Every structure is written in C-alpha cells, then in structure tokens.
Image (tube, grey):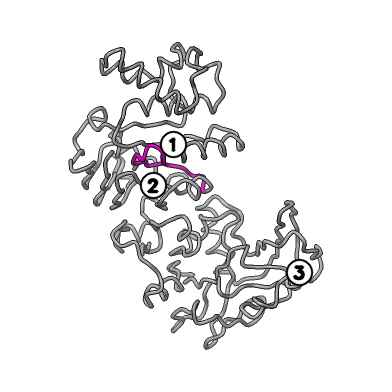
C-alpha cells in the first residue's frame, strides 16, 4: 500500500485541448477517494495518468516516496479494474485471476495460494472452472477484482466499474467493494459519474469540472456545504433547489415572500442586488405536519403544486415559479453542463409520506431557514460557506487539493472555482 500525491498535474492533448488543469491532491495510504463529475470533466483522464496509460504534460505524480512520471504502467505496481471487465473469454475464472501472476512467472504454488485466497474473499470458489460467458455481470466484475487483488499492488484504481450493471446489482456490488476495501485497507481511487456511488463509497470525494477541481471533501460535507453552484447542482438527487431573491437591506425578496435568514446562515450581501438561495428538497415540508418545536426556525409560504410523485416512504412535489431572465439563463446553462433538467425554475420539495397536499391547488409549505445557502449568481460562489469559514465555523480540509488559479482555468470554465 502507498499514498498517492498529485502536484500541479496537467494534461494537454496534441490539438491543444486542456483536459486536466493544475490538479493537486494528496491521497493518504489506505484512503478511498472518488473522482466524480459529468462526462468530459477529466476524471478518467486523471485516473489513466495515475496508472500510466496517459502521459502527464506537466506536474509531478508520486506513489509512496517515489516519482513515477516516467515509469511504465507495469512498473508502478497498481491494479486497475476497467468498466468492461477486460476478461479473457477462453480462460477459466481461475486462469483469469491468475493471469498477472503467470505473466510475472510466479511459482505455481504461490499462484494457487493467491488465487484461492482472492476467490474465497470474493465468494468465487464454485465458479473457478467456469468461463466468463457463463457468469453474471456481478460475477464477472468480481473476477476482475480478483485479478487486481492477487497482484498485491500498492493501490486499486477503478474506472466506472459498475456502469454496465443493472440498478439492483450495482447496489450489491457497491456494498461488496466497500467491504473489500475496508478489509484490505488498500489505497483506492475510484472514478464514477454516478453520485450515489460517490456518496456511499468514498472517504473523500473530488468533484471535477472541465478538468478543474471544484471541491474535495467528505460526502456529507459536499452535500451540506457545497462551495459553489456547480457542486450544489451536481451533488444530490434531486439536486439543490435554487430560488432567485432580490436583496433589500437584510431581507431577501423571493417569489414566495420576504425572508430573513438566521445569523448562522448569514452572508455578505453588501453591494449585491440579486442572489440565488439554495435549499435541498428535504429542507421543505408540508406546513401542516411540521412540529411546533421547529416551526419557528423556518418560514411558511403559499405555493401551487404542479405535480406530486408518491414514492411510498416519501413524496416529491414540484412547484414552478417565475424568475428573472438572467437567472433562468444561468440555471439553463448549468443544466446543460450537468446534463440535467432538474435545475429549471421550479422547486422540488420532499414531503412526508403522510402529507395530503393537493395537486393543482394552493398549499402551505414550510422551509427550514437554517438549511438555506446564499449563492452569487455571477461567480457561483457559496457566500454562506465563505462566511462560515471566515467565522471559523467550518473545518477546512487544508491542502487536500488546489483548484487552478484565477486566470486560465477561470476563463475557460466561466467562473472561479473555490476549494476551501
């Protein structure tokens, strides 16, 4: 096992495309780190640079205490599990797992010991004599993982390993990968575009946008305190709601009334005329089911619900609202980048399953103001998180990663990324 250190890593292709921009990241020995972001954000390119399948244009990559920029993939002692499993169809499960050991001319006795140890760990003993064509998708994935395990590498690298599986099997394999990583305690870097995988698997998550690191934090911190609009819109399903608000003194005039945020959620609004308020769907509730003990921490407002989706344990209500043209354009731009339609000018509200609010008629909803964020619609910065950091109310993961400085990366992304 070993730590992995990336310092000012860049990747430029021959046509001038800048795929990865000044990424610095410290991955601790035994840590499980997720690289996540929309398609084309550079996450797979970054993973391939770590393993050596892509050249590093500039910067330094260290595995343990050793610089490996110029080392071939076979000399980096890393195990990679691919999206398509990359199994040999003519070989049995046993020989697929043993393949890297055969290449290394490992003695037969040691090969057998390692293969059977990995097989027992992955519950593949009864399938060792079968061919890949006779296995399910989940079993093939476990064979690919077994081949990675027997190498006794310094780190595991996963490139969207579950994307070919159905939803139920993905859930099962997520659990297996998490248990396996904890049992082995091996450094793991895992690429995915699925935020459920990102939120459930990683010790820390790295959110990338157009090759630039936006935020590195624990899944909980990413969800509760996203540093900008991009992270807030990408993390969470449904994503965070964004509500346009006009600043009048210390009041925020929204399409749903005039709100005053509590001191704990205050932000520097000086010189600002319009902001975006962000609130997760679960920060809302049917006002009729809110208990008196928490009611005063929020605000009740009238809204007309367009559609209700009942899911059994909860339900989602959709509330369209009018917003200024520039705000609609800003959210539409973010929607396109995230390949999502959920950021349009509507609220997605999570309601208790017992709620009986009607569709197509006015209803009273409640919002917990203690869970509201204030965003600058121009830069995308989370002004609430900035104010919390300035007050020392938030533990900052200092040195975990650095985003590209304002300038080239900022010009290309259209906003200055912020990593606390």
Q: Mark 1 sits on what residue? A: 180
Q: Secondary structure at mark 3?
A: strand
Nearest to the eye among marks 2 and 3: give it. 2
Residue 179 image position (x, y, % from top left): 46, 39
* Horizontal relation, residue 247 to residue 271: left or right: right
Residue 208 in view in this figure: no
Which residue is labeled 3 in the image?
304
Query: x and y percent of residue 303 in the render?
Result: 73, 71
Circles 1 and 2, Cβ within 8 Å, touching? The answer is: no
Question: CA gap, disc 1 to disc 2?
Answer: 15 Å
Q: Secondary structure at mark 2?
A: strand
* Displayed quadrant of residue 97: top left
| Magenta part of the chain | 182-195
- Specify few, some or many for label 1: CA neighbours under 10 Å numbering under 14, 14-19, or 20 or more: some
Q: Quadrant of the image for the C terminus?
A: bottom left
Position of the N terminus by quadrant = top left
């Amino acid at each position: 096992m070993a730590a992995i250190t990336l310092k000012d890593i860049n990747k430029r292709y021959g046509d001038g495309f800048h795929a990865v921009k000044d990424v610095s990241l410290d991955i601790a020995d035994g840590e499980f780190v997720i690289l996540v972001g929309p398609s084309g954000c550079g996450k797979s390119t970054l993973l391939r640079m770590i393993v050596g399948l892509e050249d590093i244009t500039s910067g330094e990559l260290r595995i343990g205490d050793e610089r490996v920029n110029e080392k071939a993939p076979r000399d980096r002692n890393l195990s990679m599990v691919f999206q398509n499993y990359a199994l040999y169809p003519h070989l049995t499960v046993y020989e697929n797992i043993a393949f890297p050991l055969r290449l290394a001319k490992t003695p037969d006795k040691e090969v057998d010991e390692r293969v059977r140890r990995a097989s027992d760990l992955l519950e593949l003993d009864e399938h060792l004599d079968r061919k890949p064509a006779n296995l399910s998708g989940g079993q093939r994935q476990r064979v690919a993982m077994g081949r990675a395990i027997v190498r006794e590498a310094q780190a595991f690298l996963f490139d969207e390993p579950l994307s070919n599986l159905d939803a139920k099997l993905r859930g099962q394999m997520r659990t297996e990968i998490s248990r396996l990583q904890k049992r082995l305690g091996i450094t793991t870097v895992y690429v995915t575009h699925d935020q459920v995988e990102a939120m459930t698997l990683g010790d820390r998550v790295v959110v990338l946008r157009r090759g630039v690191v936006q935020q590195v934090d624990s899944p909980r911190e990413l969800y509760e305190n996203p540093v900008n609009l991009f992270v807030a819109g990408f993390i969470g399903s449904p994503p965070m709601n964004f509500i346009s608000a006009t600043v009048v003194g210390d009041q925020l005039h929204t399409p749903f009334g005039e709100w005053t945020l509590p001191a704990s959620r205050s932000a520097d609004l000086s010189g600002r005329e319009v902001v975006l308020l962000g609130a997760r769907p679960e920060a809302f509730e049917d006002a009729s089911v809110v208990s008196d003990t928490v009611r005063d921490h929020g605000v009740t407002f009238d809204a007309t619900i367009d559609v209700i989706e009942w899911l059994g344990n909860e339900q989602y209500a959709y509330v369209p609202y009018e917003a200024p043209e520039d705000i609609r354009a800003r959210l539409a731009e973010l929607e396109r980048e995230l390949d999502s339609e959920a950021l349009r000018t509507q609220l997605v509200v999570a309601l208790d399953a017992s709620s009986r609010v009607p569709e197509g008629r006015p209803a009273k909803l409640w919002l917990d103001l203690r869970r509201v964020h204030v965003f600058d619609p121009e830069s995308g910065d989370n002004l609430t998180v900035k104010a919390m950091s300035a007050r020392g109310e938030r533990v900052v993961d200092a040195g975990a990663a650095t985003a590209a400085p304002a300038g080239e990366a900022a010009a290309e992304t259209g906003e200055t990324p912020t990593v606390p």
